[in-house]
Image: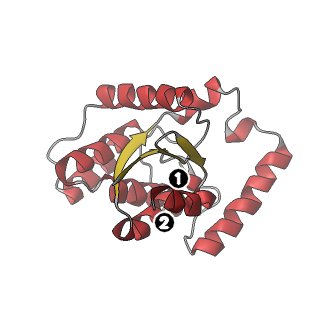
Amino acid sequence: MKTVDYYFCLNSPWSLFASKQLIKLLPTLDIQLNLKPLNIGELFTAINFPPVPERPQYMQDYRIVELTRWSKRLAIPINLAPAHFPSNEVGAIALVLAAEQADGSGLKVAADLSHELWNQDANIADIDYLAEQATKLGLLEAVDPEKCAEIMSANTKELLERGGFGVPTFIVDDEVIWGQDRIDFLVEAVS
C-alpha cells in the first residue's frame, strides 16, 4: 500500500475537480490518502504568484477557458464567478478535518463544501452555514479554527519544502504530481 499526501484547498476549482475524481478512483486504489489542506494565500505569497483578481487579464481570461474545458470534460459543473470567492475557508476546513477524524469522510466533505462554493454560491465562511453543515454531517465538534489555521499553514510550508508549488498536488514517496489533469500519473505512481 502506498501513501499519498494530497495538498488542496476549497478555494481552488482545480482541487474540486481533483477531489471528485479521487472519490471515484479510491475504491480501485490501494492507498493511504492523507488530506493536507493548505493556505493558498500563504502559498501564493511564498512563490510570488498573484491571487486571481491581481493576475494580468490574459491570465484571468485563459483561466476561464480552462475551467470551462475541464468542467465539461469531467462533467463537473461550476460557476465561473462564484459569489463568495475567495472565501476564508478555515472554518470549512475545520469540518473537513473533523469528518476525517470521525469516520474518514474528509475527502467527501471537502468535495461537497467545495462544490457548494463553486456551484451553489455558498458562503463557506459564514458561521450559520458552517453550523448547518456540522449538524448535517453529525459532527458534534469541529477542529478548533485556530488549530486548523496552524495545520493549514504547516501543510503549506511542508508542500513548499517537498518541492510543490500549487494545488492540487499529490506526493507519492518523493514524487510530486501537480494538477487535477495529471491524476493518471498518480494512478501509475501507486500501481
What's the amino acid at mark 2?
Gln
Q: How far from the left and from the top, in percent, is residue 144?
A: 25, 31
Q: Taking 28 as reference, is 65 left or right?
A: right
Nearest to the observer: residue 122 or residue 55: 55
Label 1: how many residues lie within 10 Å, few (<14), some (14-19) or many (20+)? many
Instruction: Kindly identify the residue that appears in the image at 58 percent across and 72 percent down.
Output: 74
For residue 150, above or below residue 102: above
Q: Quadrant of the C terminus?
A: bottom left
Residue at which label 1 appears:
15
Q: Nearer the viewer, residue 3 or 65?
A: 3
Q: Residue at x 29, y 45 (%)?
A: 95
Q: In which quarter of the image is the N terminus?
A: bottom left
Q: Which mark is residue 21?
A: 2
Earlier-in-chain disc, 1 versus 2: 1
Coloration of the structure image: secondary structure
User: Which x, y percent locates residue 51?
Assistant: 67, 36
Disc 1 element: helix
Q: In this view, does 89 lie above or below 76?
A: above
| Residue 33 on image: x %, y % | 36, 51
Three-letter amino acid code at disc 1? Ser
Q: CB of mark 1 within 8 Å of CB of mark 2?
A: no
